[in-house]
Image (spheres, rainbow, N blue to C red):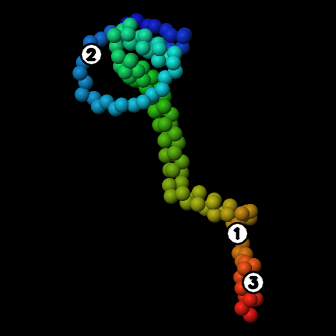
């Protein structure tokens, strides 16, 4: 394994391996790279004789492998909290009761009132003209 560092930010691991034919589905996707990243990727591709597509796929897969477990743990924790909340009030009866009490207790500042619509001036003019 060899490692190259570009601009002291991008660490790219290069694993020399024998390519094999894969039966995995591939989907074309457009991505936009910074000019310096594109240049570094092209240089690395030329140096290693590995396509830029393969390098990008490996980098994305490596990122996913490193970050998905944490995201998965956070989502599981959130789901556990939601399940716990739901068990405390399975049919939301307490929540509905609290909402109803709050509605009855406090005035609603935007509650509407019926306003009798005044006839338009043109209606008054027509009525006067026909009288």
Q: Is residue 9 above or below residue 96?
A: above
Residue at mark 2: 19
Q: Position of residue 6 (x, y in %)?
A: 50, 10
Residue at mark 1: 112
Q: Residues within 10 Å of mark 1 (few under 14, many from 20)?
A: few
Horizontal side of residue 19 vs 112, given as left or right: left
Quarter of the image holding residue 44?
top left
Is residue 58 something one can see in this rendering?
no
Quarter of the figure with the N terminus? top left
Nearer to us of marks 2 and 1 is: 2
Tag shown at residue 125: 3
Q: Position of residue 52 (x, y in %)?
A: 38, 18
Does dot 2 land on a helix, a strand or a loop?
A: loop
Q: Earlier in the sequence, mark 2 or mark 1?
A: 2
Q: Is residue 31 above or below residue 93?
A: above
Q: Residues within 10 Å of mark 3 (few under 14, many from 20)?
A: few
The residue under the point 72% across, 72% down is 113
Q: Toward the viewer: 101 or 108?
A: 108
């Amino acid at each position: 394994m060899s490692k190259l560092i570009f601009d002291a930010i991008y660490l790219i691991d290069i694993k020399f391996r024998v390519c094999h034919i894969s039966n995995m589905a591939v989907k074309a996707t457009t991505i936009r790279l910074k000019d310096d990243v594109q240049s570094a990727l092209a240089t690395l591709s030329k140096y290693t004789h590995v396509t830029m597509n393969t390098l990008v796929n490996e980098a994305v897969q490596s990122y996913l492998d490193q970050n998905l477990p944490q995201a998965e743990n956070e989502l599981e924790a959130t789901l556990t909290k939601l399940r716990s909340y739901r068990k405390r009030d399975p049919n939301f009866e307490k929540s509905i009761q609290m909402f109803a009490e709050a509605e009855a207790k406090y005035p609603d500042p935007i509650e509407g009132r019926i306003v009798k619509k005044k006839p338009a001036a043109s209606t008054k003019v027509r009525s006067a003209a026909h009288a």
